[in-house]
Amino acid sequence: MKKFFLIMILLLASGITSVFADSIHQITLGEEDESVLFFNDSEIYFMLPYEKKMMKLDRKLLAYDKDGFLKLTFNGRQALIIDGQGIKQLFANFRTDGKNKYDRYANSEESTGEYSPFYSHNVKSISASSSLKEKQYGQDIVYAPINLFRAFEVGCRCHPYWWNNAHIPWVEGAKGYGINETISIEFNNPVYGFSILNGYADVQNMKLFKENSRVKKLKVEDLTNKLEYTMAFEDKVYFNYLELSKPSNSIKLTILEVYEGTKYQDTCISAMVENTRKKSNEDWETKYFEDYKARCSYSDDTALFEKYFECVSQPEGNSSIYEKTETIKKAVNLFNRDYYWLDAYNATIGASEKSDSRYITLTFTLNREAYDSQNADMYIDEYGYKHLKLFDKNMKLEHHFTIVDTYTAKVNEDDDKWGWLSEPNTFRYAFFEHKTELLKDDKEAVAKYFSDSSFLFNNGNNIEAYKASSYLKEGKTSYDAENTAKIYNMMTKREIASWNSQIRPWVEGKKGDGIGESFEFDTTFPKGGLPLDIRILNGYVDPLKPHLFKENNRIKKALLETDTGIKKEFKFRDEVEFTRLFFQVM
Protein backbone atom coordinates (compact mmCIF):
# COMPACT_ATOMS: atom_id res chain seq x y z
CA MET A 1 0.00 0.00 0.00
CA LYS A 2 2.83 2.41 0.80
CA LYS A 3 4.47 1.73 -2.53
CA PHE A 4 1.24 2.45 -4.39
CA PHE A 5 0.73 5.68 -2.44
CA LEU A 6 4.26 6.82 -3.24
CA ILE A 7 3.79 6.20 -6.98
CA MET A 8 0.59 8.21 -6.99
CA ILE A 9 2.33 11.15 -5.34
CA LEU A 10 5.10 11.12 -7.96
CA LEU A 11 2.60 11.00 -10.79
CA LEU A 12 0.67 13.97 -9.49
CA ALA A 13 3.79 15.97 -8.77
CA SER A 14 5.19 15.53 -12.26
CA GLY A 15 1.90 16.25 -14.00
CA ILE A 16 1.67 12.86 -15.76
CA THR A 17 -1.81 11.75 -16.80
CA SER A 18 -3.10 8.39 -18.03
CA VAL A 19 -4.86 7.92 -21.36
CA PHE A 20 -7.85 6.45 -19.49
CA ALA A 21 -9.29 7.77 -16.28
CA ASP A 22 -12.04 6.33 -14.12
CA SER A 23 -14.46 8.85 -15.57
CA ILE A 24 -16.61 7.92 -18.55
CA HIS A 25 -15.58 8.86 -22.08
CA GLN A 26 -18.22 9.86 -24.61
CA ILE A 27 -18.04 9.47 -28.41
CA THR A 28 -20.86 10.78 -30.61
CA LEU A 29 -21.24 8.30 -33.45
CA GLY A 30 -23.99 9.87 -35.55
CA GLU A 31 -25.65 13.15 -36.39
CA GLU A 32 -27.11 15.06 -33.44
CA ASP A 33 -26.47 12.30 -30.90
CA GLU A 34 -28.47 9.70 -32.87
CA SER A 35 -26.03 7.12 -31.49
CA VAL A 36 -23.56 7.57 -28.65
CA LEU A 37 -20.79 5.46 -27.18
CA PHE A 38 -19.86 5.69 -23.48
CA PHE A 39 -16.89 3.77 -22.10
CA ASN A 40 -14.28 3.63 -19.36
CA ASP A 41 -11.65 1.07 -18.44
CA SER A 42 -14.18 -1.64 -17.60
CA GLU A 43 -17.45 -0.97 -19.47
CA ILE A 44 -18.91 0.05 -22.84
CA TYR A 45 -22.45 1.25 -23.43
CA PHE A 46 -23.86 1.72 -26.93
CA MET A 47 -26.89 4.05 -26.69
CA LEU A 48 -29.56 5.13 -29.18
CA PRO A 49 -31.25 8.11 -27.49
CA TYR A 50 -33.93 8.57 -30.19
CA GLU A 51 -34.82 4.88 -30.00
CA LYS A 52 -34.55 5.00 -26.19
CA LYS A 53 -32.51 1.81 -26.23
CA MET A 54 -29.04 0.83 -25.07
CA MET A 55 -26.76 -2.21 -25.19
CA LYS A 56 -23.85 -3.10 -22.95
CA LEU A 57 -20.89 -4.43 -24.95
CA ASP A 58 -17.92 -6.56 -24.01
CA ARG A 59 -15.08 -4.19 -23.04
CA LYS A 60 -12.65 -6.37 -25.01
CA LEU A 61 -14.27 -5.14 -28.23
CA LEU A 62 -12.52 -1.79 -27.72
CA ALA A 63 -8.75 -2.20 -27.99
CA TYR A 64 -5.60 -0.68 -29.44
CA ASP A 65 -4.20 -2.42 -32.52
CA LYS A 66 -0.56 -3.08 -33.42
CA ASP A 67 -0.26 0.38 -35.03
CA GLY A 68 -1.31 2.17 -31.83
CA PHE A 69 -4.87 3.10 -32.92
CA LEU A 70 -7.99 2.48 -30.82
CA LYS A 71 -10.68 0.46 -32.63
CA LEU A 72 -14.16 -0.70 -31.68
CA THR A 73 -15.29 -4.01 -33.20
CA PHE A 74 -19.01 -4.75 -33.35
CA ASN A 75 -20.70 -7.52 -35.38
CA GLY A 76 -17.92 -7.82 -37.92
CA ARG A 77 -17.35 -4.10 -38.39
CA GLN A 78 -14.77 -1.69 -36.98
CA ALA A 79 -14.70 2.01 -36.14
CA LEU A 80 -11.54 3.99 -35.49
CA ILE A 81 -11.50 6.22 -32.40
CA ILE A 82 -8.97 8.78 -31.21
CA ASP A 83 -9.69 9.41 -27.55
CA GLY A 84 -8.57 12.00 -25.00
CA GLN A 85 -9.64 14.50 -22.40
CA GLY A 86 -12.22 16.89 -23.82
CA ILE A 87 -11.24 16.20 -27.44
CA LYS A 88 -12.10 12.96 -29.17
CA GLN A 89 -13.71 11.76 -32.34
CA LEU A 90 -14.67 8.69 -34.28
CA PHE A 91 -12.63 9.10 -37.44
CA ALA A 92 -14.75 7.07 -39.81
CA ASN A 93 -17.30 9.87 -39.51
CA PHE A 94 -14.90 12.77 -40.04
CA ARG A 95 -15.51 15.36 -42.74
CA THR A 96 -12.88 16.68 -45.12
CA ASP A 97 -14.42 19.99 -46.21
CA GLY A 98 -12.03 22.68 -47.37
CA LYS A 99 -9.06 20.40 -47.98
CA ASN A 100 -8.31 21.76 -51.44
CA LYS A 101 -8.27 25.35 -50.18
CA TYR A 102 -5.95 24.27 -47.39
CA ASP A 103 -3.49 22.45 -49.61
CA ARG A 104 -2.35 25.62 -51.39
CA TYR A 105 -0.69 26.73 -48.17
CA ALA A 106 0.03 23.40 -46.49
CA ASN A 107 3.76 22.99 -46.93
CA SER A 108 5.21 26.50 -46.83
CA GLU A 109 7.17 27.64 -43.80
CA GLU A 110 6.55 31.22 -44.92
CA SER A 111 2.76 30.82 -44.91
CA THR A 112 0.86 31.86 -41.80
CA GLY A 113 -2.14 29.87 -42.99
CA GLU A 114 -4.61 32.73 -42.67
CA TYR A 115 -6.40 31.66 -45.86
CA SER A 116 -6.91 28.14 -44.58
CA PRO A 117 -10.06 26.88 -42.83
CA PHE A 118 -7.72 24.61 -40.84
CA TYR A 119 -6.06 27.40 -38.93
CA SER A 120 -6.04 28.65 -35.35
CA HIS A 121 -6.47 32.40 -35.33
CA ASN A 122 -5.30 32.39 -31.72
CA VAL A 123 -1.73 31.55 -32.79
CA LYS A 124 0.23 34.79 -32.95
CA SER A 125 3.54 33.16 -33.86
CA ILE A 126 5.09 29.71 -33.85
CA SER A 127 8.64 28.54 -34.50
CA ALA A 128 10.77 25.44 -34.02
CA SER A 129 14.43 24.83 -33.48
CA SER A 130 14.35 22.63 -36.61
CA SER A 131 11.89 21.19 -39.14
CA LEU A 132 12.33 18.29 -41.53
CA LYS A 133 12.34 19.06 -45.26
CA GLU A 134 12.01 16.41 -47.95
CA LYS A 135 10.66 15.87 -51.47
CA GLN A 136 7.42 13.95 -52.06
CA TYR A 137 5.60 13.47 -55.36
CA GLY A 138 8.05 15.92 -56.91
CA GLN A 139 7.30 18.71 -54.43
CA ASP A 140 9.31 20.14 -51.55
CA ILE A 141 7.54 19.30 -48.29
CA VAL A 142 8.24 21.18 -45.06
CA TYR A 143 7.03 19.55 -41.82
CA ALA A 144 6.70 22.98 -40.21
CA PRO A 145 5.46 23.70 -36.65
CA ILE A 146 2.39 25.58 -37.95
CA ASN A 147 1.11 22.16 -39.08
CA LEU A 148 0.23 21.47 -35.44
CA PHE A 149 -2.71 23.84 -35.86
CA ARG A 150 -3.78 22.65 -39.32
CA ALA A 151 -5.22 19.26 -38.45
CA PHE A 152 -8.74 20.30 -37.45
CA GLU A 153 -11.40 22.91 -37.92
CA VAL A 154 -13.87 23.53 -35.12
CA GLY A 155 -17.32 22.39 -36.25
CA CYS A 156 -20.68 21.66 -34.70
CA ARG A 157 -21.34 19.72 -31.51
CA CYS A 158 -21.69 16.31 -33.15
CA HIS A 159 -18.53 16.82 -35.21
CA PRO A 160 -16.35 18.93 -32.90
CA TYR A 161 -13.38 18.85 -35.26
CA TRP A 162 -13.29 18.41 -39.03
CA TRP A 163 -10.24 16.40 -39.98
CA ASN A 164 -8.02 17.63 -42.77
CA ASN A 165 -7.08 14.49 -44.70
CA ALA A 166 -4.08 16.25 -46.33
CA HIS A 167 -2.58 17.14 -42.95
CA ILE A 168 1.08 16.45 -42.15
CA PRO A 169 2.68 16.75 -38.68
CA TRP A 170 5.55 18.80 -37.35
CA VAL A 171 8.72 16.73 -37.63
CA GLU A 172 11.99 17.88 -36.09
CA GLY A 173 14.86 18.19 -38.54
CA ALA A 174 17.86 17.48 -36.32
CA LYS A 175 20.14 14.47 -36.55
CA GLY A 176 19.12 11.57 -34.36
CA TYR A 177 15.88 11.47 -32.42
CA GLY A 178 15.38 15.20 -31.84
CA ILE A 179 16.19 15.24 -28.13
CA ASN A 180 16.15 18.86 -26.85
CA GLU A 181 14.47 20.15 -30.04
CA THR A 182 11.91 22.84 -29.22
CA ILE A 183 8.68 24.51 -30.36
CA SER A 184 7.83 28.04 -29.18
CA ILE A 185 4.27 29.39 -29.44
CA GLU A 186 2.84 32.84 -28.79
CA PHE A 187 -0.96 33.07 -28.42
CA ASN A 188 -3.13 36.14 -29.01
CA ASN A 189 -5.45 35.16 -26.17
CA PRO A 190 -4.30 33.32 -23.04
CA VAL A 191 -4.71 29.55 -22.93
CA TYR A 192 -5.71 27.52 -19.88
CA GLY A 193 -4.41 24.24 -21.23
CA PHE A 194 -3.95 22.27 -24.44
CA SER A 195 -4.18 18.80 -25.95
CA ILE A 196 -1.41 17.21 -28.01
CA LEU A 197 -1.85 14.47 -30.59
CA ASN A 198 1.52 12.75 -30.46
CA GLY A 199 3.49 11.03 -33.24
CA TYR A 200 2.68 10.76 -36.93
CA ALA A 201 -1.06 10.07 -36.50
CA ASP A 202 -2.32 9.57 -40.05
CA VAL A 203 -5.58 7.64 -40.35
CA GLN A 204 -4.86 7.13 -44.06
CA ASN A 205 -1.52 5.41 -43.39
CA MET A 206 -1.63 4.18 -39.81
CA LYS A 207 1.70 2.34 -39.86
CA LEU A 208 3.48 5.73 -39.89
CA PHE A 209 2.81 6.15 -36.16
CA LYS A 210 5.10 3.28 -35.12
CA GLU A 211 7.51 3.67 -38.04
CA ASN A 212 8.38 7.22 -36.91
CA SER A 213 9.59 8.24 -33.47
CA ARG A 214 7.12 9.68 -30.93
CA VAL A 215 7.53 11.85 -27.86
CA LYS A 216 7.74 9.94 -24.59
CA LYS A 217 8.34 12.90 -22.29
CA LEU A 218 7.93 16.60 -23.04
CA LYS A 219 9.01 19.60 -21.00
CA VAL A 220 6.45 22.43 -21.07
CA GLU A 221 7.59 25.92 -20.08
CA ASP A 222 5.02 28.61 -19.35
CA LEU A 223 7.13 31.64 -20.24
CA THR A 224 4.42 34.07 -19.17
CA ASN A 225 4.30 32.88 -15.56
CA LYS A 226 7.74 31.24 -15.42
CA LEU A 227 6.28 27.81 -14.58
CA GLU A 228 7.40 24.40 -15.77
CA TYR A 229 5.50 21.14 -16.36
CA THR A 230 6.23 17.64 -17.65
CA MET A 231 3.95 15.77 -20.04
CA ALA A 232 4.41 12.00 -20.31
CA PHE A 233 2.87 10.14 -23.24
CA GLU A 234 1.78 6.53 -23.52
CA ASP A 235 2.76 4.95 -26.82
CA LYS A 236 -0.73 5.17 -28.32
CA VAL A 237 -2.67 7.52 -30.58
CA TYR A 238 -4.70 9.79 -28.29
CA PHE A 239 -5.07 13.40 -27.21
CA ASN A 240 -2.96 14.08 -24.12
CA TYR A 241 -4.24 17.09 -22.16
CA LEU A 242 -2.27 19.41 -19.87
CA GLU A 243 -4.08 21.85 -17.60
CA LEU A 244 -2.00 24.95 -16.78
CA SER A 245 -1.96 26.37 -13.27
CA LYS A 246 -2.35 29.88 -14.69
CA PRO A 247 -3.44 31.12 -18.14
CA SER A 248 -0.50 31.80 -20.44
CA ASN A 249 0.24 33.56 -23.72
CA SER A 250 3.66 31.99 -24.30
CA ILE A 251 4.54 28.27 -24.29
CA LYS A 252 7.75 26.42 -25.09
CA LEU A 253 7.88 22.65 -25.65
CA THR A 254 11.12 20.64 -25.41
CA ILE A 255 11.54 16.96 -26.33
CA LEU A 256 13.12 15.08 -23.41
CA GLU A 257 12.57 11.41 -24.29
CA VAL A 258 11.17 9.53 -27.29
CA TYR A 259 9.75 6.19 -28.34
CA GLU A 260 12.08 5.15 -31.16
CA GLY A 261 10.52 4.52 -34.59
CA THR A 262 10.82 1.10 -36.19
CA LYS A 263 11.90 2.67 -39.51
CA TYR A 264 12.72 6.37 -39.03
CA GLN A 265 14.48 8.34 -36.29
CA ASP A 266 12.40 11.48 -37.01
CA THR A 267 10.27 12.48 -34.01
CA CYS A 268 6.79 13.78 -34.88
CA ILE A 269 3.91 15.64 -33.22
CA SER A 270 0.68 15.66 -35.21
CA ALA A 271 -1.54 18.30 -33.67
CA MET A 272 -2.16 20.69 -30.81
CA VAL A 273 -5.49 22.14 -29.71
CA GLU A 274 -5.46 24.95 -27.18
CA ASN A 275 -8.17 25.62 -24.58
CA THR A 276 -8.99 29.33 -24.22
CA ARG A 277 -11.50 28.79 -21.43
CA LYS A 278 -11.00 27.68 -17.88
CA LYS A 279 -11.77 24.00 -17.63
CA SER A 280 -15.04 23.27 -15.89
CA ASN A 281 -15.01 21.07 -12.81
CA GLU A 282 -18.32 19.62 -13.96
CA ASP A 283 -18.05 16.03 -15.22
CA TRP A 284 -20.36 16.53 -18.20
CA GLU A 285 -19.72 13.12 -19.73
CA THR A 286 -20.79 11.29 -16.60
CA LYS A 287 -23.81 13.58 -16.36
CA TYR A 288 -24.82 12.85 -19.98
CA PHE A 289 -24.29 9.14 -19.40
CA GLU A 290 -26.56 9.08 -16.37
CA ASP A 291 -29.17 11.14 -18.26
CA TYR A 292 -29.18 8.84 -21.30
CA LYS A 293 -29.10 5.73 -19.13
CA ALA A 294 -32.21 6.91 -17.29
CA ARG A 295 -34.05 7.43 -20.60
CA CYS A 296 -32.95 4.20 -22.33
CA SER A 297 -33.89 0.62 -21.63
CA TYR A 298 -31.67 -2.40 -22.27
CA SER A 299 -32.13 -4.13 -25.62
CA ASP A 300 -30.64 -7.16 -27.38
CA ASP A 301 -31.84 -6.03 -30.82
CA THR A 302 -28.42 -6.40 -32.45
CA ALA A 303 -29.74 -5.63 -35.95
CA LEU A 304 -30.98 -2.21 -34.80
CA PHE A 305 -27.65 -1.23 -33.26
CA GLU A 306 -25.76 -2.63 -36.25
CA LYS A 307 -27.79 -0.36 -38.57
CA TYR A 308 -26.55 2.73 -36.72
CA PHE A 309 -23.01 1.44 -36.39
CA GLU A 310 -22.75 0.63 -40.09
CA CYS A 311 -22.86 4.35 -40.97
CA VAL A 312 -19.65 5.06 -39.08
CA SER A 313 -17.63 1.89 -39.55
CA GLN A 314 -16.08 -0.41 -42.12
CA PRO A 315 -16.07 -4.22 -42.52
CA GLU A 316 -13.56 -5.82 -40.15
CA GLY A 317 -10.32 -6.63 -41.95
CA ASN A 318 -11.11 -4.27 -44.84
CA SER A 319 -8.74 -1.36 -44.42
CA SER A 320 -9.37 0.10 -47.87
CA ILE A 321 -10.96 3.21 -46.36
CA TYR A 322 -7.60 4.24 -44.98
CA GLU A 323 -5.02 2.49 -47.16
CA LYS A 324 -6.40 3.23 -50.64
CA THR A 325 -5.78 6.91 -50.16
CA GLU A 326 -2.17 7.12 -51.37
CA THR A 327 -3.66 8.12 -54.75
CA ILE A 328 -5.70 10.81 -52.99
CA LYS A 329 -2.54 12.31 -51.51
CA LYS A 330 -0.88 12.24 -54.91
CA ALA A 331 -3.92 13.87 -56.55
CA VAL A 332 -3.95 16.58 -53.90
CA ASN A 333 -0.27 17.30 -54.49
CA LEU A 334 -0.06 16.74 -58.25
CA PHE A 335 -3.36 18.08 -59.60
CA ASN A 336 -3.72 21.86 -59.48
CA ARG A 337 -7.48 21.66 -60.08
CA ASP A 338 -10.37 19.43 -59.02
CA TYR A 339 -11.33 18.69 -62.63
CA TYR A 340 -10.30 19.39 -66.24
CA TRP A 341 -12.31 19.54 -69.43
CA LEU A 342 -10.75 17.45 -72.20
CA ASP A 343 -11.89 18.77 -75.59
CA ALA A 344 -10.76 15.60 -77.35
CA TYR A 345 -13.21 13.54 -75.25
CA ASN A 346 -15.89 16.20 -74.79
CA ALA A 347 -15.74 15.13 -71.16
CA THR A 348 -14.22 16.03 -67.82
CA ILE A 349 -11.55 14.25 -65.85
CA GLY A 350 -10.91 14.97 -62.21
CA ALA A 351 -10.60 13.74 -58.69
CA SER A 352 -13.56 14.00 -56.31
CA GLU A 353 -14.88 12.31 -53.18
CA LYS A 354 -17.90 10.10 -53.58
CA SER A 355 -20.98 12.05 -52.56
CA ASP A 356 -22.77 8.94 -51.29
CA SER A 357 -20.06 7.94 -48.87
CA ARG A 358 -18.76 9.25 -45.55
CA TYR A 359 -15.52 7.47 -46.23
CA ILE A 360 -12.45 8.95 -47.87
CA THR A 361 -12.55 7.52 -51.39
CA LEU A 362 -11.61 9.06 -54.70
CA THR A 363 -13.21 8.89 -58.14
CA PHE A 364 -11.73 9.79 -61.51
CA THR A 365 -14.37 10.14 -64.22
CA LEU A 366 -13.68 10.02 -67.96
CA ASN A 367 -16.26 9.36 -70.68
CA ARG A 368 -18.77 8.49 -67.95
CA GLU A 369 -16.44 5.76 -66.70
CA ALA A 370 -15.47 6.00 -63.02
CA TYR A 371 -12.12 4.90 -61.62
CA ASP A 372 -11.61 4.81 -57.87
CA SER A 373 -8.39 5.19 -55.90
CA GLN A 374 -7.20 1.63 -56.40
CA ASN A 375 -7.64 1.89 -60.19
CA ALA A 376 -5.58 5.06 -60.63
CA ASP A 377 -1.92 5.90 -60.30
CA MET A 378 -0.31 9.33 -60.36
CA TYR A 379 3.39 10.13 -60.33
CA ILE A 380 6.10 12.46 -61.58
CA ASP A 381 8.65 10.72 -63.77
CA GLU A 382 12.43 11.09 -63.65
CA TYR A 383 12.26 14.00 -66.11
CA GLY A 384 9.76 16.06 -64.09
CA TYR A 385 6.57 15.31 -66.08
CA LYS A 386 3.29 14.38 -64.41
CA HIS A 387 1.53 11.12 -65.34
CA LEU A 388 -1.94 9.72 -64.69
CA LYS A 389 -2.77 6.06 -65.36
CA LEU A 390 -6.31 4.67 -65.20
CA PHE A 391 -6.92 0.89 -65.00
CA ASP A 392 -10.02 -1.26 -65.45
CA LYS A 393 -11.34 -3.59 -62.75
CA ASN A 394 -8.82 -6.26 -63.78
CA MET A 395 -5.99 -3.69 -63.45
CA LYS A 396 -5.48 -3.58 -67.21
CA LEU A 397 -4.24 -0.17 -68.33
CA GLU A 398 -6.97 1.78 -70.17
CA HIS A 399 -5.61 5.35 -70.26
CA HIS A 400 -2.16 6.84 -69.78
CA PHE A 401 -1.77 10.62 -69.78
CA THR A 402 1.28 12.85 -69.63
CA ILE A 403 0.11 16.16 -68.15
CA VAL A 404 1.34 19.73 -68.44
CA ASP A 405 -0.71 21.49 -65.77
CA THR A 406 -1.12 25.15 -64.75
CA TYR A 407 -0.14 26.49 -61.33
CA THR A 408 -1.25 30.00 -60.28
CA ALA A 409 1.49 31.95 -58.53
CA LYS A 410 0.43 34.57 -55.99
CA VAL A 411 1.57 38.04 -57.06
CA ASN A 412 -0.85 40.46 -55.36
CA GLU A 413 -2.65 40.36 -52.01
CA ASP A 414 -6.04 40.62 -53.76
CA ASP A 415 -5.40 37.71 -56.16
CA ASP A 416 -8.04 35.59 -54.42
CA LYS A 417 -10.88 37.78 -55.72
CA TRP A 418 -10.00 36.69 -59.26
CA GLY A 419 -10.28 33.02 -58.37
CA TRP A 420 -13.17 32.53 -60.78
CA LEU A 421 -10.74 33.14 -63.64
CA SER A 422 -9.21 29.78 -62.85
CA GLU A 423 -12.31 27.99 -64.12
CA PRO A 424 -11.58 25.44 -66.88
CA ASN A 425 -12.63 27.78 -69.72
CA THR A 426 -9.62 29.99 -69.00
CA PHE A 427 -7.30 27.43 -67.40
CA ARG A 428 -4.76 26.10 -69.93
CA TYR A 429 -3.34 22.60 -69.63
CA ALA A 430 -2.39 19.63 -71.79
CA PHE A 431 -3.34 15.96 -71.44
CA PHE A 432 -1.35 13.82 -73.89
CA GLU A 433 -2.74 10.28 -74.05
CA HIS A 434 -0.30 7.60 -75.22
CA LYS A 435 0.13 3.83 -75.16
CA THR A 436 3.86 3.69 -74.43
CA GLU A 437 5.53 4.58 -71.14
CA LEU A 438 6.87 7.83 -72.65
CA LEU A 439 4.90 10.03 -75.03
CA LYS A 440 7.81 10.38 -77.47
CA ASP A 441 7.75 6.63 -78.22
CA ASP A 442 4.09 6.53 -79.37
CA LYS A 443 4.09 7.55 -83.05
CA GLU A 444 0.29 7.83 -83.26
CA ALA A 445 0.18 10.15 -80.23
CA VAL A 446 3.02 12.28 -81.57
CA ALA A 447 1.18 12.67 -84.90
CA LYS A 448 -2.01 13.57 -83.03
CA TYR A 449 -0.65 16.22 -80.69
CA PHE A 450 2.30 17.73 -82.58
CA SER A 451 2.68 19.66 -85.88
CA ASP A 452 5.73 20.85 -87.78
CA SER A 453 7.03 24.39 -87.49
CA SER A 454 5.03 25.60 -90.54
CA PHE A 455 1.80 25.34 -88.52
CA LEU A 456 0.34 28.46 -86.91
CA PHE A 457 1.50 28.52 -83.29
CA ASN A 458 -0.03 31.56 -81.63
CA ASN A 459 0.27 31.18 -77.85
CA GLY A 460 1.67 34.74 -77.73
CA ASN A 461 -1.10 36.43 -79.72
CA ASN A 462 -1.56 39.24 -77.15
CA ILE A 463 2.17 39.86 -76.76
CA GLU A 464 4.53 41.83 -78.98
CA ALA A 465 7.93 43.56 -78.99
CA TYR A 466 9.87 40.75 -77.35
CA LYS A 467 13.23 41.76 -75.96
CA ALA A 468 15.80 39.95 -73.83
CA SER A 469 19.05 41.12 -72.26
CA SER A 470 20.80 38.19 -73.99
CA TYR A 471 20.07 34.95 -75.82
CA LEU A 472 21.99 31.84 -76.76
CA LYS A 473 23.12 31.08 -80.35
CA GLU A 474 24.36 27.65 -81.36
CA GLY A 475 25.40 27.65 -85.01
CA LYS A 476 22.32 28.53 -87.08
CA THR A 477 19.98 27.98 -84.13
CA SER A 478 18.91 31.03 -82.13
CA TYR A 479 17.19 30.66 -78.76
CA ASP A 480 15.77 34.20 -78.83
CA ALA A 481 12.84 35.72 -76.95
CA GLU A 482 10.34 35.41 -79.83
CA ASN A 483 10.57 31.62 -79.65
CA THR A 484 8.35 31.73 -76.58
CA ALA A 485 5.35 32.68 -78.79
CA LYS A 486 5.72 29.60 -81.01
CA ILE A 487 5.14 26.71 -78.60
CA TYR A 488 1.51 25.68 -79.15
CA ASN A 489 -1.76 26.65 -80.82
CA MET A 490 -4.57 28.35 -78.86
CA MET A 491 -7.51 27.45 -81.12
CA THR A 492 -9.09 25.13 -78.53
CA LYS A 493 -10.92 26.61 -75.57
CA ARG A 494 -9.14 24.85 -72.75
CA GLU A 495 -7.01 21.85 -73.57
CA ILE A 496 -3.94 22.56 -75.69
CA ALA A 497 -4.18 20.07 -78.55
CA SER A 498 -1.49 21.14 -81.04
CA TRP A 499 2.14 21.62 -80.06
CA ASN A 500 5.21 22.54 -82.05
CA SER A 501 7.28 19.43 -82.85
CA GLN A 502 10.43 21.57 -82.91
CA ILE A 503 10.18 23.56 -79.68
CA ARG A 504 12.97 26.01 -78.98
CA PRO A 505 12.68 28.10 -75.81
CA TRP A 506 14.33 31.38 -74.95
CA VAL A 507 17.74 30.63 -73.43
CA GLU A 508 19.78 33.39 -71.86
CA GLY A 509 23.22 33.81 -73.40
CA LYS A 510 25.22 35.09 -70.47
CA LYS A 511 28.11 33.11 -69.03
CA GLY A 512 27.17 31.36 -65.82
CA ASP A 513 23.67 30.64 -64.57
CA GLY A 514 21.93 33.75 -65.96
CA ILE A 515 21.20 35.48 -62.66
CA GLY A 516 20.17 39.07 -63.40
CA GLU A 517 19.18 38.46 -67.05
CA SER A 518 15.85 39.95 -68.14
CA PHE A 519 13.01 39.22 -70.56
CA GLU A 520 10.70 42.05 -71.68
CA PHE A 521 7.57 42.32 -73.82
CA ASP A 522 4.59 44.57 -74.52
CA THR A 523 1.00 43.41 -74.34
CA THR A 524 -1.96 44.40 -76.53
CA PHE A 525 -4.35 43.48 -73.72
CA PRO A 526 -6.67 46.47 -73.02
CA LYS A 527 -6.10 48.37 -69.79
CA GLY A 528 -8.78 48.39 -67.11
CA GLY A 529 -11.43 45.73 -66.56
CA LEU A 530 -10.18 42.16 -66.21
CA PRO A 531 -6.62 41.53 -65.02
CA LEU A 532 -3.81 40.59 -67.37
CA ASP A 533 -3.38 36.82 -67.54
CA ILE A 534 0.10 35.50 -68.37
CA ARG A 535 1.34 31.88 -68.36
CA ILE A 536 5.02 31.05 -68.26
CA LEU A 537 6.29 27.60 -69.23
CA ASN A 538 9.47 27.50 -67.17
CA GLY A 539 12.56 25.57 -68.23
CA TYR A 540 13.27 23.68 -71.45
CA VAL A 541 9.88 22.01 -71.88
CA ASP A 542 9.66 19.75 -74.92
CA PRO A 543 7.41 16.71 -74.35
CA LEU A 544 9.20 14.93 -77.22
CA LYS A 545 12.57 15.48 -75.54
CA PRO A 546 11.65 15.22 -71.86
CA HIS A 547 15.26 14.87 -70.65
CA LEU A 548 15.99 18.51 -71.55
CA PHE A 549 13.94 19.88 -68.63
CA LYS A 550 16.24 18.52 -65.91
CA GLU A 551 19.43 18.76 -67.98
CA ASN A 552 19.11 22.56 -68.29
CA ASN A 553 18.74 25.21 -65.57
CA ARG A 554 15.24 26.36 -64.62
CA ILE A 555 14.19 29.61 -62.98
CA LYS A 556 13.52 29.30 -59.24
CA LYS A 557 12.61 32.91 -58.41
CA ALA A 558 11.93 35.92 -60.66
CA LEU A 559 11.14 39.61 -60.25
CA LEU A 560 8.05 40.92 -62.06
CA GLU A 561 8.08 44.62 -62.98
CA THR A 562 5.48 46.56 -65.01
CA ASP A 563 5.20 50.12 -66.29
CA THR A 564 2.16 50.51 -64.02
CA GLY A 565 4.30 50.27 -60.88
CA ILE A 566 4.00 46.57 -59.98
CA LYS A 567 7.22 45.15 -58.58
CA LYS A 568 6.87 41.73 -57.05
CA GLU A 569 8.97 38.60 -56.62
CA PHE A 570 7.35 35.24 -57.32
CA LYS A 571 8.52 31.62 -57.29
CA PHE A 572 8.39 28.76 -59.75
CA ARG A 573 7.88 25.18 -58.67
CA ASP A 574 10.38 22.72 -60.10
CA GLU A 575 7.80 20.91 -62.21
CA VAL A 576 6.82 20.80 -65.87
CA GLU A 577 3.84 23.16 -65.71
CA PHE A 578 2.59 26.60 -66.66
CA THR A 579 3.09 29.19 -63.95
CA ARG A 580 0.18 31.58 -64.17
CA LEU A 581 0.31 35.26 -63.18
CA PHE A 582 -2.61 37.63 -63.29
CA PHE A 583 -2.62 41.23 -62.20
CA GLN A 584 -4.57 44.40 -62.89
CA VAL A 585 -3.39 46.61 -65.77
CA MET A 586 -4.28 50.20 -64.90
Image (cartoon, rainbow, N blue to C red):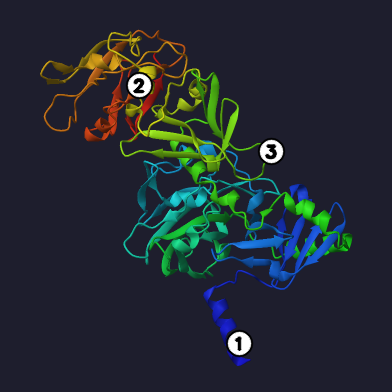
Decide if residue 528 is in sight here: yes
Rounded to the nearest whole Å, what is the CA distance between mark 2 and mark 3?
40 Å
Cα distance in 3D space between marks 3 and 1: 53 Å
Q: Position of residue 16 (x, y in %)?
A: 55, 73
The kind of residue tagged 2 is Val
Q: Please tell me which of labels 2 and 1 falls first in the chain.
A: 1
Q: Amino acid at mark 3?
A: Asp
Q: Which residue is mark 2?
A: 446
Does residue 325 lie above or below 27 as drawn?
above
For label 3, the residue is 356
Front of the two marks 2 and 3: 2
Residue found 59% across the figure and 82% down from its top: 8
Q: Is residue 153 above or below residue 40?
A: above
Q: Secondary structure at mark 1?
A: helix
Q: Locate the N terminus and report the quarter of the image it occupies.
A: bottom right
Q: Position of residue 504 (x, y in %)?
A: 24, 20
Label 1 amino acid? Phe
Label 3 residue SS: loop
Q: Work out whether residue 440 or residue 101 is closer to the camera in this orientation and state it.
A: 440
Q: Which residue is mark 1?
A: 4
Taking depth in this image into account, of 44 and 390 the one nearest to the observer is 390
**Which quadrant of the figure has residue 388?**
top left
Residue mark closest to the camera, 3 vs 1: 3
- Count how many numbered circles sit on residues in the image: 3
Are circles 2 and 1 on residues that touch, CB within 8 Å? no
Estimate how packed mark 2 is, as few (under 14), some (14 to 19) or many (20 or more) residues with alpha carbons within 10 Å: many
Circle on res. 526? none
